[in-house]
Amino acid sequence: MLALCLDLEGILVPEVWVNVADRTGIDALRRTTRDEPDYNRLMSYRLAILDENNITIDDITSAIDSMEPLEGARDFLGSLQRRWPTLILSDTFSQFASPLMAKLGHPTLLCHTLMIDDSGRIFDWKIRTEDQKRKTVEALRGMNYQVIAVGDSYNDTTMLSEASAGILFRPPDNVIDEFPQFPVTRDYAELMDAIESAATDLGELWA
């Protein structure tokens, strides 16, 4: 039995915080998990910037509403879902993800939650569980699934290492340099080829 686990941002949709940075003109918000491996440090940094600039959840969701999936992402995801159980594992937040999930056809997403006060200020975040991507893959493997995982950033590397096969998709050079054990793909055709090759190596049939 085979299951697929995909990161969301950079794999199927653009980076949310980069789009927020573009919309608000606050370049400091362009920093993502491609740059900072410590997620808690990154989120503390982001919330401080939001407070300094009086950016509310409404400002952020307005930016997200204008986003579209990456070109070809919905067809690629649908092709995976027709063949294998497919989960999206993300360090985004449920409040951010809803409009994006609708545009992707409502796939299964496991992510985190923001804490928001009555004024719309984001004052904290609630992690579903530490290292949730790796733990989800570990749980699937404990149920006798072979798992192929796809990511692009530092916060995906424990998931890729835990999986039966890990694949990088359009990663930055710093991630490629630090994790040379993972094959690198640059478009959905290459990624599908890499997934099918990994499935074959794992002895899994695919249509």
Image: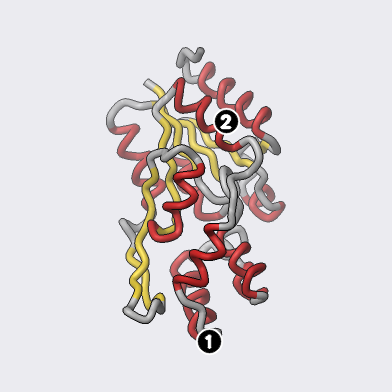
Is 138 positioned to the left or the right of 72 in the image? Answer: left
Which residue position is annotated with label 1? 52
List x then y, in percent, for residue 62.
Answer: 53, 65
List x then y, in percent, for residue 156.
Answer: 51, 49
Marks 1 and 2 in Cβ contact (< 8 Å): no
Which residue position is annotated with label 2? 75
Residue 106, quarter of the rendered image: top left
- Amino acid residing under circle 1: Glu
List x then y, in percent, for residue 169.
Answer: 63, 41
- Amino acid residing under circle 2: Asp
Residue at image location 28% in from the left, 29% down from the top: 143
**Residue 152 seen:** no
Residue at image location 68% in from the left, 55% down from the top: 174
Mark 2 element type: helix
Identify the image quadrant of the N terminus: top left
Q: Say which label, 1 or 2, has the lower sequence index.
A: 1
